[in-house]
Amino acid sequence: MLKRKVARHPMFRISCQHASRLLSQREEAPLPFAQRIKLRVHLTVCDACTNVSRQFQTMRLAMQRWRDKA
Amino acid sequence: MPNAGAALTTIEFTVLAEHRAYLLKVARLQLRDEHLAEDCVSDALTHAFEKRASFRGDSSLRTWLTTILKNRIVDLLRKQWREQPLEPAPSGEQEFDQLFDNTGHYIEMPSRVPDPAELCQQDGFLAAVQRCVDKLPKRVGQVFVLREVFGSDTQELCKDLGLTSSNVWVQLYRARMMLRTCLEKDGFGRAET
């Protein structure tokens, strides 16, 4: 599939380890353009990092719910 | 009505004190020290009471009290961090190497959270998250709680703790990776039950 080819291209290829760091960083500040593209391409082909992205969002929501619970 | 002022004062302090349990909960998570947490909360309530005229009501009383508590806590942490600066942080790369294979991919598939909002409504899950936060290394936990409970952004964290922004991001990355590892053992699985 085309998107897999793109994701494997050296210009876009990043490891899950790198992607996870970007996933955390983007919770804090907008990513620079190049990183944003690489991450987006990676997420289209990587279920593991898509799940981690969800997990990070869940943690943020959980902390808010925990705080606001009477 | 000679006693009107006094009566009002009594009521107001009672109203503030209603938030005590809430403030204690967040102070405990932040400081991991019962006495220190109680001191901070008492301080914050006293200060709020003295400054009650400056409460404008544009935010909720709880938000206002939380800000006052946060300032107390930040003063305390700033002192701690100045006396004992952060050791050069692991870059956050090697630290989690064991989670990845030699091509940098996850060895174990991270759990899928089908419905974060639903999961976060479960008290059991929130309790698991709290347990995992309490297990974070002290400094990592402090940065994370300031970020996620008190809502400090990168700029504030840098100023308050004397860190660079990349340092803040590394600490938060470490916190999140440790938390997700902890929640893989007890937490995320609750989504399926």
Image (cartoon, rainbow, N blue to C red):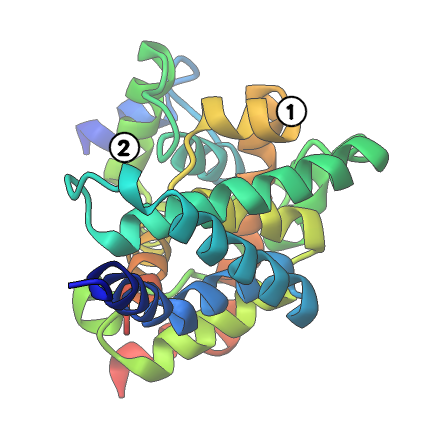
Left or right of residue B92, residue A52 in this image: left
The label on residue B7 is: none
Assign the N terminus of chain B to one quadrant of the image. Answer: bottom left
Q: Nearer the viewer, mark 1 or mark 2?
A: 1
Q: How many marks?
A: 2
**Most foreground residue, B52 or B150:** B52
Q: Position of residue B39 (x, y in %)?
A: 62, 62
In this view, B116 is above or below A25: below
The residue sitting at 57% across, 24% down in the picture is: B158
- Amino acid residing under circle 1: Leu
- Position in image of residue B123 (x %, y %): 31, 81
Mark linked to residue B163: 1
Q: Residue at x 64, y 24 (%)?
A: B163
Q: Disc 2: which chain?
A: A
Q: What number is the disc on residue A4? A: 2
Q: Is residue A8 above or below residue A54?
A: above
Per the image, label 1 sits on a secondary structure element best described as loop
Left/right placement of residue B36 relative to residue B118 reads right
Using the rendered image of the protein, determine whether residue A23 is visible from the camera's viewpoint. yes
Q: Residue furthest bottom?
A: B193
Q: CA distance from mark 1 to mark 2?
A: 39 Å
Q: Quadrant of the C terminus of chain B?
A: bottom left
* Co-location on one chain, circles 1 and 2: no
Residue count near mark 2 (Cα–Cα under 10 Å), binned few <14, some 14–19, many ≥20: few
